[in-house]
Amino acid sequence: MPGSEQDGRKIYRVGEITRLIRVALENEFGSVWIEGEISNLRRPSSGHLYFTLKDESAQIAAVFFKGAQRGLAFALKDGVKVRMFGEISVYEASGQYQVIVRKVEEAGKGSLQEAFEALKKKLAAEGLFDASRKKPLPVLPRHVGIVTSPTGAAIHDILSVLSRRFPNLHIVIAPVKVQGGEAAGEIAAAIDLFNERGGIDVMIIGRGGGSLEDLWCFNEEVVARAIARSRIPVISAVGHEIDFTISDFVADLRAPTPSAAAELMVGRKAAFEEQLQQVGARLVRCLRERALELRNRVTAAGRSYVFREPRNLVRQFVQHIDALRASLLTGLEGAARERRVRLDSLGLRLAHGVELKTGALRQDVRRIASQLRALSPLAVLDRGFSITRLKGGAIIRDAADVGAGAVLQTQVARGVLESKVISKESGGKHGREEKR
């Protein structure tokens, strides 16, 4: 007989009464079918599954041992509506009653899961999940905004990581509810407030783990649209690594946990300082190597012929310029003046070509000059002829054109004679002239 008698009272030990309750439940209900929605599913390394089965008014714990899972035709996850067969029992260590599951059938999706997938499909169609609209996080933020509960585990985890990694960050916390009917509105308002306030480089929103209904405020459309319109980059850090919310898909970056969000946002201060030291050391080394290189070039230049004998170099350039000027003048004589002679780096070949060209041009000039002299009226003077002009320069072709006393100039092959007309004869006879 359980219990003991003391002062007429029957007193049970905790283990005894819990065992009696377990036996009573098992005897009363035996094996039953229960329908509900899976929530808060956990998968420890043992392979057993622990979850809560709930409906709109109540919930019950369930355990699905690994050996009973053989033949399961679908994956169990939060939000799935199932019918399960098992025994009602009590886990004596915690005093919690539970269902030991023997068989599970899918009964359709739960209402929360259906709402989640419907909103996810709607927002995806609008492009709110597109990678192209994701904003990059700042490399080293100075001002950080955090939207979460001021008393939850998430804020303590975030602050712990930030203080360890980069203790001189400026952190602004927007305290909000992260569970319940008012939570979604407060979260959206806090996101908008940070954007209106300004001065924030990056923002973290989130909370610690929980069931699907506990995290539901982060699946609300009002929160998703507040994240989408935020000009400040948003990191979503909701629940544990296996938890996914609409906020995760809309945010610029999804972190598996609040602690991971803080780690993703800032690097270790010591790592930054070490990197800066390495960069500084490389910069100093490069500058020293460059300075040494320039110094060696200056030293080599100082030892070169140019700097040792600068006058000789100038004289060479002067001589070279004179030679070029002479070649240019030679090449531009006569008709060649209209042509441009181009000098190239071949030197001797160019000089030879110019000399040949100049010789040909000289021969042409001599030939043309000889032709001109042969055609010149002055050439007949060498054969004994002469040209007589008036004092004013007009050539005399007819004696009738000259009066007595006129001064004449007679040009012979070598010189000019000046004379004065004394008399003249008509009929083509020459007049007598007084020459001097």
Image (cartoon, rainbow, N blue to C red):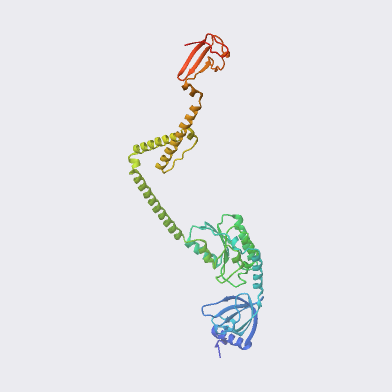
**Camera-side residue: 343 or 383?**
383
Q: Residue at x 35, y 48 (%)?
A: 296
Q: Quadrant of the N terminus?
A: bottom right
Percent coordinates x, y for residue 390 in the rendering: 54, 15
Relative to 104, is 305 on the left or the right? left
Vertical arrangement, residue 143 with respect to residue 71, above or below: above
Q: Quadrant of residue 304?
A: top left
Percent coordinates x, y for residue 226 in the rendering: 63, 61
**Camera-side residue: 119 or 312?**
312
**Camera-side residue: 131 or 273?**
131
Which residue, as the protein is rendered here, is positioned at the far bottom?
A: 1
Q: Is residue 13 visible?
A: no
**Camera-side residue: 66 or 194?**
66
For the image, the number of numbered tags is 0
Q: Quadrant of residue 327?
A: top left
Vertical arrangement, residue 212 with respect to residue 421, above or below: below
